[in-house]
Image (cartoon, helix red, strand yellow):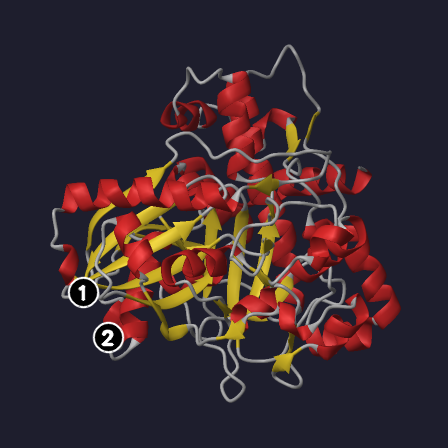
Amino acid sequence: MYFLGFDIGSSSVKVALVDGADGKCLASAFYPKQEMNITAVQSGWAEQKPEDWWNNLKLALQEVLSVSKVQTTEIKAIGISYQMHGLVLVDKEQNVLRPSIIWCDSRAAQIGKKAFEDLGAEICLGELLNSPGNFTASKLKWVKDHEPELFQRIHKIMLPGDYIAMKLTGEIKTTLSGLSEGMFWDFKTHALSKTVMQHYGFDNSLIPELTDTFGAQGQLSTSAAQELGLHTDIKVTYRAGDQPNNALSLNVLRPGEIAATAGTSGVVYGVNDKIAYDPLSRINTFAHVNHSAESKRLGILLCINGTGILNSWIHKNIGQGAISYSRMNELAAQAPIGSAGLITLPFGNGAERVLNNEEIGAQFSKINFNIHSLSHLIRSAQEGIVFSFKYGIDIMKEIGMGPKVIKAGQANMFLSPIFQKTLAGVTGATIELYNTDGSVGAARGAGVGLGYYTSFDEAFKSLQKLEIIEPNPSDQAAYAEAYGKWKEELERV
């Protein structure tokens, strides 16, 4: 028996096929091979066409089926991971009404800020565990205010993963964790937030039917099966946002455990069993994949928008694509800790929650033409990303989520030894790298949702620890000094 995992990112769509018997990935692929386009009609905006996610999914799936050569009748379940906080709008015929306003779009930041001021901290933090901020509900309010005719045509709103599930099954549903990430969930009443719906003037009919995170969420439709080259005897049995799913991929499900990713954006994600939140909503609290009213499992999420996208920007615009990422990592290793004083603030991908939703842009400072080279610039960029992680982790510590061990998949920025060592050095945490990614985790989650696995530990028995990076005591002072200078520059800006 085999399971498919679909990971709908903003850079690409990745598909993995996992053998249920041993939990191993038989084949994986991603499309497009170059990064997916993000349209910015105005500064601070970020949109993608949901149809592009679907088309790239089909291309990646065909490659996986071709490479694996499995009998498609043996594929029994699909799990979906998706970029969080996006807004997809469809009419009654399930036609997409406009491009998706995705996670790094900043246009609704002021709407969320005003809602927080109008409703008050006690209500927002007590019920939503966050400010309405720049999340999905605030993005929908922007559509209501600025595109009123289109708003009247909306049948249902969805998150990106809900859209993919709709394309697979023909049914429009969402999950508790999805509603919580969109600021639609009331943790006091364990129900759709009346406060948000009434304040923003939304009718409850816009919200899809609720389905369990793990379980039968719909059957593959005949039309989808034909389009994908699959059989209809396949169920969608799991879906979650990319960061809760990344934690699941690493079997991070218990209070105190912490996962991290460093793709286009970077995230540190800890699991808590108590209601906890940052009063300024610089870090956010959402329902984790195994959360329930009876057994609280909350994800404390630190997000840094400008992570791998900064590394990619340097690769494309400074290296002109002629220097490979592995070579960039080698060059970074030639510069000393602290990059000889060159400082990078990596905040060039929209408003940053950790900075109170300010959009300060990426900045390079303290450049000395007689000292600094490409090696210093690359290292400074990687250090700047890690230092922004450290800045947010210090906020996480204020609500009891200080990391001793950080688990991550061996991918993206975690392929860089400088990135690994800097994160261990500046936080004092041990970094553990594993053989997994979001699509593989989603496939294993599908096995859990189907009931093939009787426990999470069984589903992740093949998870392998590939590398351990311990903090080097002799470097601690140098990292602390470099971080101190970086923080001073950030506070100056």
Identify the residue at horizontal 48%, vertical 23% (top origin): 315
| Amino acid at circle 2 | Tyr
Q: Which residue is mark 2?
A: 453
Regarding mark 2 in the picture, which secondary structure is present there?
loop
Identify the residue at horizontal 21%, vertical 62% (top origin): 462
The vertical placement of 216 against 241, above or below, is: below
- The reply to whether discs 2 and 1 touch (Cβ–Cβ < 8 Å) is yes
Residue 348 visible to the viewer: yes
Image coordinates for residue 446, horizontal then vertical, percent: 31, 66
**View extreme (front): residue:** 93
Identify the residue at horizontal 41%, vertical 40% (top origin): 412
| Image side of residue 314 versus residue 410, left or right | right
Q: Which residue is mark 1?
A: 20
Chain-order first, disc 2 or disc 1: 1
| Amino acid at circle 1 | Gly
Image coordinates for residue 246, horizontal then vertical, percent: 42, 58
Image coordinates for residue 190, horizontal then vertical, percent: 61, 83
| Image side of residue 259 versus residue 67, left or right | right
Mark 2: few, some, or many residues within 10 Å (few <14, many ≥20)? some
* Mark carried by residue 74: none
Image coordinates for residue 172, horizontal then vertical, percent: 49, 66
Q: Nearer the viewer, residue 470 or 164?
A: 164
The vertical placement of 383 against 457, above or below, is: above
